[in-house]
Image (spheres, rainbow, N blue to C red):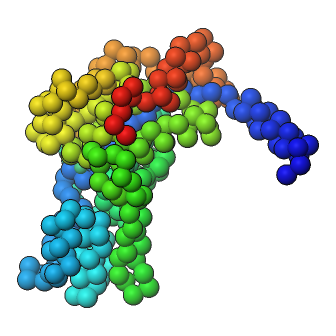
Amino acid sequence: MSSKQSSAAVAEAVASCKLKKQQRRRLAAFDFDHTIVSQNTDTVVRDLLPSEVTSARANELVENDCWTEYMAEVFRLLHEQQVPEARIRDTIRGIPEVPGFVRLIKHLAKRLHYDLIIISDSNSVFIEEWLRAHSLADCFVAVFTNPAEFDASGRLLVRAHHQQSDCKLSASNLCKGRVLEHFVIEQDLRRSIRYDHVFYVGDGNNDICPVLRQRACDFACARKGFAMEKHLLRNRSKLKLRAQLLIWKSGFDLMDQMLALPQLQTPQGPSDRDADGDPDPKNEAPEVTRRASAVAGPAKSPN
Ligand SMILES: [Mg+2]
Ligand SMILES: [Zn+2]
């Protein structure tokens, strides 16, 4: 590229940045298994195998904590046992919600105009199937999980979401904290969307990493009686959680707690924007400091 061309490209990029007015929104990021759905999608599908069917490879992978590779082997065995795609999809659709979550998701997305995402160590086939069956697919702006597909012979293939070794809190195939941080930064850079409050809703040990990266204006929402809550409460002083902790029992309970938060009493979404969908200009000032902390992340992150 010549210098003339490149300066023209820069000028164009600057112009398009200026055209995009900043939007301020709220984000809710959800885990899937035992948060939105009441079971573990992987183990429910694994249990379609006759109990005597396993393989040396499956045993070795599960012992070495290679969960995604283990599930890939389980899907190979299901295919070998001629368990059809339709039966796997039916099984996923039949998993009940955690009470109140379908309503919570619809309310946040459609009425309160939150951006919603899922960050899950399940896979794209299971999550998309369940969301479609519950008419929730259009409530989420993105689903981050292990990509999967049925091949022409009906075998389910699954790959790791990414490969990482930086974060010791997370599995090598998925660091949910990294996914959440990248999403927030991308929304700002690409779409000029900034989040005043980020809710992270989960239940498990792999939901610890993302909440430790949250800001003081955010909310870590842990399911009562599950591993995430126990870990956060047991290690409270050591972990230096900056986000406000909400402990929830159901989607109904979480919605009640969210609606009662004093920080959230001013409505957001189309109701406080002008006709172009732009935020009220009087709200612009505090954005600078907030953005700096969102991008910088934790002061002393191990990641
Ligand atoms: Mg979970
Ligand atoms: Zn992590």
Toward the left, the furthest residue is 52
Q: Is residue 195 left or right of residue 6?
A: left
Residue 291: x and y in percent read: 52, 24
Residue 54's quadrant in the figure? Answer: bottom left
Instruction: Please tell me which residue is depicted at 18% across the width and 56% down the height of the picture.
Output: 39
Near-viewer residue (236 or 143): 236
* Position above or below: 218 against 60: above
Residue 223: x and y in percent read: 18, 38
Near-viewer residue (29 or 7): 7
* Position above or below: 218 against 169: above
Near-viewer residue (59 or 127): 59
Residue 1: x and y in percent read: 85, 52
Residue 175: x and y in percent read: 35, 48
Instruction: Please tell me which residue is depicted at 25% across the width and 65% down the height of the picture.
Output: 66
Q: Is residue 100 visible?
A: no
Q: Quadrant of the C terminus?
A: top left
Instruction: Please tell me which residue is depicted at 30% across the width and 73% down the height of the picture.
Output: 72
Q: In this view, does 84 lie to the left or right of 159?
A: left
* Position above or below: 136 against 129: above
Instruction: Please tell me which residue is depicted at 29% across the width and 65% down the height of the picture.
Output: 68
